[in-house]
Image (cartoon, coloured by chain):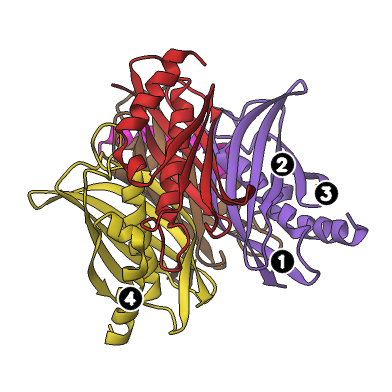
Chain colours: A yellow, B red, C purple, D brown
Amino acid sequence: MSAQIENRIRDSFARQSMMQTLGATLADIAKGKVEITAPILDGSRQQQGVAHAGLTFAIGDSAAGYSALTLIPEGMEVMTTEMKINLLAPGAGDHLVARGRVIKPGRRLMVVQSDIFAVTDGAERHIAMMVGTMIPVDL
Amino acid sequence: MSAQIENRIRDSFARQSMMQTLGATLADIAKGKVEITAPILDGSRQQQGVAHAGLTFAIGDSAAGYSALTLIPEGMEVMTTEMKINLLAPGAGDHLVARGRVIKPGRRLMVVQSDIFAVTDGAERHIAMMVGTMIPVDL
Amino acid sequence: MSAQIENRIRDSFARQSMMQTLGATLADIAKGKVEITAPILDGSRQQQGVAHAGLTFAIGDSAAGYSALTLIPEGMEVMTTEMKINLLAPGAGDHLVARGRVIKPGRRLMVVQSDIFAVTDGAERHIAMMVGTMIPVDL
Amino acid sequence: MSAQIENRIRDSFARQSMMQTLGATLADIAKGKVEITAPILDGSRQQQGVAHAGLTFAIGDSAAGYSALTLIPEGMEVMTTEMKINLLAPGAGDHLVARGRVIKPGRRLMVVQSDIFAVTDGAERHIAMMVGTMIPVDL
């Protein structure tokens, strides 16, 4: 990973105010792979007290998008065109971690995957799987 | 709509702290149809300043889930098992409105749809379409 | 519908040998909407004797794709980039009909929907709903 | 894998007439994993001469379903409730192979994945990825 690409992603992440609202952090950036963590804040819950699917989706989508951005030429962005989430288990734990990666890079479209885990005392439970499509666009 | 079902949904919505974080409001409840509105808060944006897909997803998912809940026996809840979102246009406008409805009710699974619109000066633009599956569970 | 566009779609359909294998027929073509019908042949079934999801998917995907093609400039094709199917009821009946339509046209991507019905003695039952993305490509 | 489970899957596969129409073969069965291969028959093509997405979907869906069936109690079946396919590359080659596996087993629902490859002179190209949900039902 060039420092240039990492800076580009950190700058973009810092402009995503939703990530700050959710308390999310860019944990790791590598070529084609990005990890985002987030606490399950008091304000991020559904009616039963576990993580709202909106939290899971938001960090999973961002992790997937930034994994695509690591492979995109300077001066371009990516946008989500579609994303499906399969929820595997309730989002209960100390915090969530979303690991995004590129399944299929492409000039016109990029297929990406995100796996989201709930972490309790260091043990990870796979709570959601997302597969979607990112489209490169000019900034 | 019985007052009982409407109360059940308003109670559940009030317990979804994520909805409060996003400033979302239960706008309308009918048999098999629920509408949720949300402003595009300063804290709900992506890097280009428009609504984060996490906001769009969160209110769309909740509207779809509550539309299913209007058709479910007392003493049961619904949970999202899977949901796909196709993003049609940027989430720019005064606020968003998500209209959820039941496509196919079922005892074991319910297929639901949500359409999300960005509203500017009263004019609606279709920004996202979601189709997913809700599963009834005991409370 | 210009005769030119209709001919383009009929020519393309005739080259889809899978449609012939499944006994499918182009039933109706309008601007942004295409209907395909298919019998449930002895060779198109799953283990319980009803229509295989592969049949439902194949005609639904083709109907959606051709609905996009009605809106595309001459000299271009469309390809499916992603498609989700929600199965609503078993594919039992005299034949199937798939109605594809464009939800969101676009220069770079087109979001499409297909609804598939099983027809028994003229009565339609909604058996599947598909939403996906078509990408225009040069021929 | 018990011989009983393997027989159950081979019996079910033999009753899927669509698999015979497509020339598909059950290549491999293991606990939670099933592989199906199929030639790209003259009758299984789209308008450009490569594999129709209906073929790719049909064998991917069946491989995923049977991977779930390896984990299901005797006397039950599985049915697809929803399935999304992301197409990664054209289906051109000597034949296709679909590898289905269970991502998340469950008593009420099973999340499954299928990856489909086009094989040319022994070299595999990843042409599609599918993620979906199977529901166990009584026979």
Q: What x and y, as percent, mark residue B63?
A: 47, 36
The residue singled out by tag 4 in the image is A11
- Mark closer to the chain start, 3 or 2: 3
Q: Position of D136 compared to D58: left or right?
A: left
Circle 2: residue type: Arg
Disc sitting over residue C30 in the figure: 3
Disc 3 and disc 1 on one polypeptide chain:
yes
Q: Position of residue B122 (x, y in %)?
A: 63, 47
Residue extending farthest to the left is A121
Residue D10 in magenta stretch: yes
Identity, as a three-letter code, of the amino acid under mark 3:
Ala
State whether residue A95 appears in this view: yes
Closer to viewer: mark 3 or mark 1: 3
Relative depth, front residue between A33 and B63: B63
Could you tell me which quadrant the C terminus of chain D lies in?
top left
The first of marks 3 and 1 along the sequence is 3
Q: Which mark is residue C77?
A: 1
Badge 4 crowding class, 10 Å Cα cut-off, few under 14, some 14 to 19, many 20 or more, is few
Please name the residue shown 60% across and 31% down the image.
C127
Amino acid type, callout 4:
Asp
- Residue marked by disc 2: C99
- Which residue is drawn at the image coordinates 43% and 17% (left, top)? B5
Please tell me whether mark 3 or mark 4 is closer to you in this view. 4
Name the secondary structure under disc 1. strand
- Nearest the viewer among A31 and A55 is A55
